[in-house]
């Protein structure tokens, strides 16, 4: 019997908030967090999400990421193992802010500190005129899987593309 394409029924049960009292991200001048750097690499500075990412926004990003993860049969994340990275001057995208989600603290450590990331999930904010879109990237190198999705400021989903290509 042929298997149907997976639906996101389990992930759709999440009803995340679409906004909150706090700003999405607590960043200072030049988009730098007020917290200490967790890990510095040539291309990125990593920070813990706590104190930077508003709880309501993290809940929204986790729900959307799990929706996309279920579509490609990746394990869910809960938001507890989370980092924010900022592109350094040597990055292809200096100053770009990314949220990275992991299934466990061990996976976070393996990926950020040891640079072993067989499964990768990130979301970055893309400015379109005066609004922000959420561009998601999921990969599983063992399956040669790369999935990209864009969610507009109004919640419209554009699958199989980044927000950079969405008008």
Image (spheres, rainbow, N blue to C red):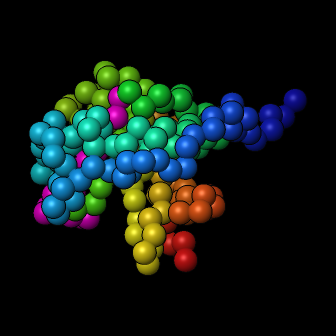
Image quarter in which the N terminus is found = top right
Was residue 87 drawn as part of the magenta stretch in this picture? yes
> What residue is at 73 percent from the left and 35 percent from the top?
9
Say if 57 sits above or below 86 in the image: above
Say if 154 sits above or below 122 in the image: below
Image quarter in which the C terminus is found = bottom right
Q: Give the range drawn in magenta.
A: 81-94
- Res. 96 in view: yes
Residue 99 location (% of width, % of height): 35, 46
Q: State the residue in front, 69 or 157.
A: 157
Say if 50 sits above or below 107 in the image: below
Q: State the residue in front, 1 or 110.
A: 110
Q: Is residue 70 rendered to the left or right of residue 162?
A: right
> What residue is at 19 percent from the left and 32 percent from the top?
113
Was residue 92 drawn as part of the magenta stretch in this picture? yes
Q: Is residue 130 rendered to the left or right of residue 30?
A: right
- Res. 86 in view: no
> What residue is at 52 percent from the left and 54 percent from the top?
148
């Amino acid at each position: 019997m042929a298997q149907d394409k997976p639906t996101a029924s389990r992930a759709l049960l999440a009803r995340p908030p679409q906004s909150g009292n706090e700003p999405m991200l607590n960043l200072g001048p030049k988009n730098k967090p007020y917290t200490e750097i967790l890990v510095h690499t040539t291309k990125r500075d990593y920070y813990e999400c706590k104190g930077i990412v508003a709880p309501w926004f993290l809940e929204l990003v986790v729900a959307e990421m799990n929706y996309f993860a279920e579509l490609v049969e990746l394990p869910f994340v809960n938001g507890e193992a989370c980092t924010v990275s900022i592109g350094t001057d040597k990055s292809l995208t200096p100053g770009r802010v990314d949220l990275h989600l992991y299934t466990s603290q061990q996976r976070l450590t393996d990926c950020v500190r040891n640079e072993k990331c067989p499964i990768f999930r990130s979301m970055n904010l893309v400015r379109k005129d005066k609004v922000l879109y959420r561009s998601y990237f999921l990969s599983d190198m063992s399956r040669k899987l790369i999935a990209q999705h864009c969610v507009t400021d109004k919640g419209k989903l554009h699958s199989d593309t980044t927000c950079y290509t969405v008008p």
